[in-house]
Amino acid sequence: MSEEKKKIIYSAMQPSGVPSLGNYIGALKNWKNLQDEYNCLFGVANMHAITVRQNPAELRQRTKDLVALFLAIGLDPEKHIIYVQSDVKAHAEIAWILNCFTYMGELNRMTQFKDKSAKHADNINAGLYTYPVLMAGDILLYQSDLVPVGADQKQHLEICRDIAGRFNGVYGDVFKIPDPYIPKVGARIMGLQNPERKMSKSESDNVNNVIYILDEPNVIRNKIKRAVTDSDTEVRYSEDKPGVSNLLNIYSAVTGKPIDEAAAEFKGCGYGEFKTGVGEAVVAELEPIQQRFKEYSSDKAYLEKVMKEGAEKASYIANKTLTKVKKKVGYPIYK
């Protein structure tokens, strides 16, 4: 497939903490697999991150760490664009314009705003409220064809499509209307201690509930050994066995084996042996990434080169869209 005919796919992640195994299996692992088929943009969404109070030094470091992690999992900055959101000024500019084409009623329906407001009741800010508009700008600036979305992001893509359609209805075909990208593979990974809820990198109450990509191998093994199962002893995939099913999902995702094959592999095994097998499989998947992460994160000159060049490439594309938008709404355009 020629570069010209490849569709554009836009993906971004906040530097709000070390990504979890759930983030890796549900998003990052799939991002790597998209590179041959699509023209990809991989963003570090640090503008979104400040809707919650951040320690500035930690945010800067986590931003660089996430770029290093993108490289460590195999994202290629020579063939695709890896960039930091705040390095591209067009994001802030287009967000204001799109705010003026977004209705309060639409924002009031956003469930993530309600959830985050409950968690951060002392900091319910306007940025948190208009977060979906900034996200819409992220996507629309690059004329994205597809956006990988999880269940918790579907609303945001829907409002993005609505905003783009509204703007196009007034000014003509300015924005490409993006479609959701549904990965062909990739399970929804749940918490180890609470397999009824999604594994989240923002987990703070119980670190044993989450495996982080950069957890030491023995930490990973021990967390999986402590994972909740049930009073039964049979390893099988079933709705009434959420803990065991979650571990099978994890094993299947990191080994590439179908669930049925994974379950058959542990037939007759006790939960101890099963958990050991899952732990070793996760370590085998993550340890090489951790080693490459250490190499990239220690090479500050190369990291900054990737970030600078990524910002230049992203800005070139974004500014073409932004100039067209500014012209349409009546801003002066200077040559």
Image: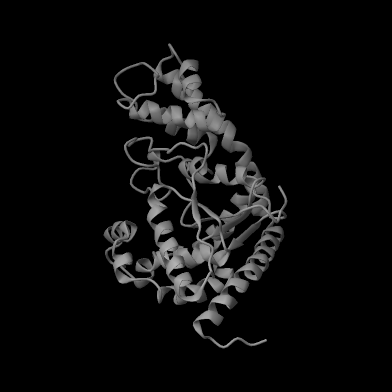
**Percent of width and height locating residue 215:** 51, 41
Viewed as shown, does residue 197 lie left or right of 84? left
Q: Is residue 243 above or below residue 197?
A: above
Viewed as shown, does residue 325 lie left or right of 234? right
**Percent of width and height locating residue 113:** 32, 61
Viewed as shown, does residue 205 lie left or right of 25? left
Closer-to-camera residue (198/163)? 163
Q: Is residue 310 above or below residue 276?
A: below
Residue visible at 63% across and 70% down?
315
User: Can the viewer see residue 57?
Assistant: no
Viewed as shown, does residue 117 lie left or right of 19? left
Closer-to-camera residue (318/1)? 1
**Percent of width and height locating residue 71:** 64, 50
Figure disc tally: 0
User: Can the viewer see residue 175?
Assistant: yes
Closer-to-camera residue (204/33)? 33
Residue visible at 57% across and 88% down?
332
Residue visible at 54% across and 76% down?
325
| Colour option used | one colour
Q: For the C terminus, give its image quadrant.
A: bottom right
Q: Is residue 284 above or below residue 172?
A: above
Q: Quadrant of residue 222?
A: top left
Furthest residue to the top? 268
**Percent of width and height locating residue 63:** 55, 60
Residue visible at 57% across and 74% down?
322
